[in-house]
Each structure stands twice: as structure tokens, then as C-alpha cells.
């Protein structure tokens, strides 16, 4: 009887050890990021940047409105050539405004991404450190399910699944 218990215990030992290694966890990375002190500096920089751009766009809008008003006030007293020139000027200003707006939006996103990158890297490093210290196999982001940390022991099954599918 002792031999059977010992045999069963020895057979179960690897499974118990293996199950203890597989610790999965999750974090709410967005919530952590929002509470990091560096975020307030990024928010201030972005607010200043956006305020400058808003002022610039408002000045452009004022110029467009002024030129549009001139065009509307021309009436029949001016030649078609002068009216056409003024109409083209308004159209050109509006097109420049649209291009500037698109550029500002893209630049703003790039600037924000550049400012956030070192903070995000710091967060990921902290997640990795905590994961390693606590022997987690994988840690997922609660918001989107992305893997934020993966143990070196994790196995990528992509090739095996492709083989099974005949790909």
C-alpha cells in the first residue's frame, strides 16, 4: 500500500510543480498610466501645444471670414476677373486651413506618442519586474487582453497550428 501511495505521489509531483509554475495575471495598464506622476507633465505640454495651435487656427479662420466678407461685399460693381481672384483667394485660404488642420492633428498625435513612450516603457519595465519577482507565466492587459509580459518558458504554438491547418 505504501508503494502505491509513494508511486502515485511521485507521478503527481511533476504535475503539482508544473501547475505551480503557471501563474497568470492581469493589470489595468491604463489606470496605472493615468496615475503615474509623469502624466501631468505630458498633459501640460500637450495642453500648451494645443493652445498654440488653436490660436493659430482661429487666426486663419478670422482671415478666411474677412476675405469671404470682402467677396460678398463686392457685388456687381467689380469685374468678373476681380471677383474670380477674390473667390480663388478664399478657396485657397480654406484649402490651406484644411491642410494645416490635418498636419496639426497628425503632429499632435506624434508629439503625444513621443511624450508617452518613455512613460509606457517605464510601466512595462515595472510590470516585467513584478512578473519575474512573483514568477508569473504571463500577464495580460485588462483593457485589451494584450500580453504585457511573457515568461521565457512560454511556447509559441503558431507553427504547430499552421502545420495542423496544412499551411
Image (cartoon, rainbow, N blue to C red):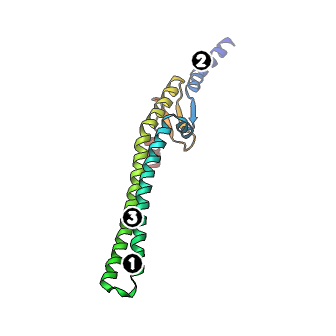
- The residue depicted at 38 percent of the width and 82 percent of the height is 74
Front-most of residues 83 and 112: 83
Furthest residue in direction top, as rendered:
2
Residue 167 in view (yes/no):
no
Dot 1 or dot 2: first in sequence order is 2
Q: Residue 10 carries which label?
A: 2
Q: Distance between the residues labelled 1 and 2?
A: 92 Å
Dot 3 or dot 1: first in sequence order is 1
Task: Tell me where residue 156 appears, x and y as whole percent.
Answer: 45, 37
Task: Tell me where residue 165 appears, x and y as whole percent.
Answer: 46, 49
Q: In this view, does 63 lie above or below 134?
A: below
- The residue depicted at 57 percent of the width and 29 percent of the height is 23
Say whether residue 24 is left or right of residue 152.
right
Q: Between tags 2 and 3, which lies in front? A: 3
Q: Between tags 1 and 2, which lies in front? A: 1
Q: Which residue does the numbered mark 3 point to in the structure image?
A: 97
Amino acid at each position: 500500500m505504501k508503494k502505491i501511495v509513494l508511486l502515485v505521489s511521485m507521478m503527481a509531483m511533476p504535475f503539482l510543480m508544473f501547475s505551480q509554475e503557471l501563474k497568470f495575471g492581469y493589470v489595468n495598464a491604463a489606470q496605472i498610466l493615468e496615475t503615474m506622476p509623469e502624466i501631468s507633465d505630458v498633459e501640460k505640454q500637450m495642453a500648451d501645444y494645443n493652445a498654440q495651435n488653436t490660436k493659430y487656427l482661429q487666426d486663419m479662420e478670422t482671415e478666411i471670414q474677412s476675405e469671404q466678407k470682402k467677396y460678398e461685399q463686392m457685388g456687381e460693381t467689380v469685374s468678373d476677373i476681380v471677383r474670380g481672384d477674390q473667390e480663388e483667394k478664399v478657396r485657397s485660404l480654406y484649402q490651406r486651413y484644411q491642410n494645416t488642420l490635418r498636419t496639426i492633428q497628425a503632429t499632435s498625435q506624434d508629439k503625444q506618442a513621443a511624450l508617452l513612450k518613455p512613460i509606457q516603457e517605464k510601466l512595462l519595465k515595472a510590470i516585467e519586474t513584478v512578473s519575474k519577482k512573483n514568477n508569473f507565466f504571463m500577464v495580460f492587459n485588462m483593457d485589451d487582453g494584450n500580453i504585457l509580459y511573457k515568461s521565457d518558458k512560454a511556447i509559441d504554438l503558431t507553427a504547430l497550428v499552421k502545420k495542423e491547418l496544412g499551411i
